Image (cartoon, coloured by chain):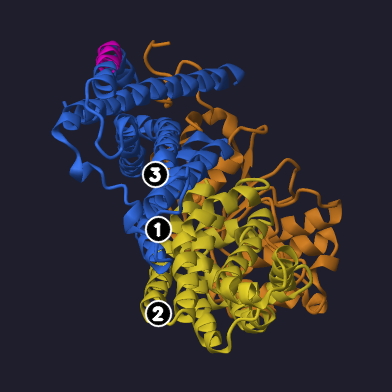
Chain colours: A blue, B orange, C yellow
Amino acid sequence: MSLWQYANPVKFMALSGRVLPTLTVLSACLLITGLIWGFFFTPDDYQQGSTVKIIFLHVPAAMMAINAWVMMLVASLIWLVRRHHVSALAAKAAAPIGITMTLIAIATGAIWGKPMWGTYWAWDPRLTAFMILLVFYFGYIALWSAIEDSDMAADLTSILCMVGSVFALMSRYAVNFWSQGLHQGASLSLDKEQHVHDAFFYPLMICIIAFILLFITLVLLRTRTEIRLRRASALVARGAK
Amino acid sequence: MSLKVENLTLTRGGRTILSDVNFSAPAGACLILRGENGSGKTTLLKTLAGLLPVEAGTFHAPDEEIAYSGHLDAIKAQLTVRENLRFWAGIYDASNMDAVANTLSLSDLMDRVAGTLSAGQRRRLGLARLFLTGAKIWLMDEPTTSLDGHTTKLVAALIADHCAQGGSAILSTHVDLDIPKAQTLDLTEFAPTADQPSADPFLAGDYT
Amino acid sequence: MIALLRRDIVLAFRSGGGFGLTLGFFLILVMFVPLGIGSDADILARIAPGILWIGAILSCLLSLERIFQIDYEDGALEALATSPIPLEGIAAAKAMSHWITTGLPLTLVAAPLGYLLSLPADLYGWLIASLLCGTPALSFIGTFGAALTVGIKRGGLLLSLLVLPLYIPTLIFGAQTVTRASVNLPATSALMILAAISLFSIVVMPFAAGLALRAALK
């Protein structure tokens, strides 16, 4: 018995089918608790007023935007090394969720930025890094949808994910270098986590855990859909023969 | 120098196409693959050439003794015949370029731009690559498509010559080639039977 | 590999090879800048490094699709894949010939085009050095992108979408080298990082491209 047995579609479907209801309820409860606590039962910041409360959406979404890519990278490597179909499909399933998280992070950041910096968008290194992450997601999803053969698509997207990770990381640091060059920077830093007050800390943690569970729920759900799609096309192919 | 195929099973997109293929091609043998479209001729040839992965089973042949020629000629229309030949000679580190050009009666065409060649001349230039590889075992996918009767005969004669000199050839074709001592291998006998369990992991189980 | 390199260079210069197209595109792009934003020499001089780098990247993008597509369509790639040369070697030779027919000429014409954009005289050295150090990365990364999309019909647009994000670090350090030099900041560090990115791409990308080709030829 090993963890790898769940890489088998049948086993995966059985297990994910069993845990999904619990996960769904749990992530919904935590999300509601965390957000209500964060929005209504925390004090206003003395500098930022109530605008600071968008942190409860912004920070978890930004974290999951990056974590989703890391999960795709791990799943891609598993596919390349061990050829588990479920792994490749899980990576495929995670990409649209990752891109949504990235968009939520950028959108909430813009809404937060308007009252704080007086602008929806500035070419701050962190904002730029998220924009870059967004285009990497675009490329990954586009490559999946461009290739007919599912195994070949899994191979090529996995390779892209691997190489893309290296260059995304490189871009992240390149952007820091570039921004210094333009003498912007420190005043627009988004490093709020370090200064976060205790009253904000607990609801924020709940929101972060809720987003992690939400992500897992959505990935499982979408992977199940992808498996069913593959099964359907395999059945059609067998019928056509 | 012989090619030996044992219990080879091939799949394409999760679907088993051929199962338990067994045959051997000793030196001097010419094997003609038969079977309708989709019966796995191209898949088998590509697998033997090392372009496709093997699902199960084995085949034995040293890599450097295998030369593969697909549907297309791999000719650059902007280059002259000589440049085309010199390129492939460079790739295979071959020194017999002029001899090959002679054998395929390309010597008079050497300075012609390949784009101006007739279909038969193009095919000869394409086949020249197989000679340049120096490999003994030729894998040829439809070597005579879109050729007239005369050129088809010429190609058949070249293959027969190659086999007579101790080489071997495995080829797929729809037309009858006049090659003495050629054996036929019907791939339909290796088609998977309906009751065989599928290799596709997504067909297993009973979830919906 | 030498044979492949030589053939690809010859093909690029023969009719329909696309060598002239790249340079023509670069010229038109640079010409569009003053037409679009006005001919003020001060503004042009300030944005010239960025424009020249973006122009070089876009011109380079034009010829990426040809790297494997033509060989794929006429069967030569399949034949090469079964030849004694490993796919990694094929990718490296292709990237090298792409650089010789694209990156190198772009570097050479960048200086006169810089003059058209009123680039200050003391920056030509930095511009040429940055392009010389950076364009190999463009070719090797681009070859990887071309390998990913080799089996896709009309994959040109997709290729751009895949490759351009990978060009971000090269663009940043390339343009920064010249920009920093223009405001009297130390530019050597940017140039060194740029060269490091190129060396990294030269070493790693042929392997990634070989992996992609192997998957795409199945």
Q: Nearer the viewer, residue C41 or B207?
A: C41
- The chain identifier of the residue carrying mark 1 reads A
- Determine the secondary structure under disc 2: loop
Q: Which residue is mark 2?
A: C185
Residue A19, position as x, y percentages in the image: 26, 15
Which numbered disc, 3 or 1, marks the residue closer to the eye? Answer: 1
Q: Nearer the viewer, residue C161 or A77?
A: C161
Q: Label 3 vs label 1: CA separation?
A: 46 Å
Q: Nearer the viewer, residue A5 or C185?
A: C185
- The chain identifier of the residue carrying mark 2 reads C
Residue C146, position as x, y percentages in the image: 56, 56
Q: Nearer the viewer, residue A59 or C29?
A: A59
Task: Write the start and end of the magenta stretch as one range.
Answer: A19-29
Q: Which residue is mark 3?
A: B58
Kind of residue at badge 2: Leu
Q: Label 1 vs label 2: CA separation?
A: 21 Å
Label 1 environment density (alpha carbons within 10 Å; few <14, some 14–19, many ≥20): many
- Residue A27 belongs to magenta span: yes
- Determine the secondary structure under disc 1: helix
Name the disc covering residue A171, or none.
1
Label 3 environment density (alpha carbons within 10 Å; few <14, some 14–19, many ≥20): some
Kind of residue at badge 3: Thr
Residue C39, position as x, y percentages in the image: 72, 73
Label 2 environment density (alpha carbons within 10 Å; few <14, some 14–19, many ≥20): few
Q: Main secondary structure of the magenta part?
A: helix
* Residue in the picture at 27% in, 19% down: A40
Above or below C215: residue C13: below
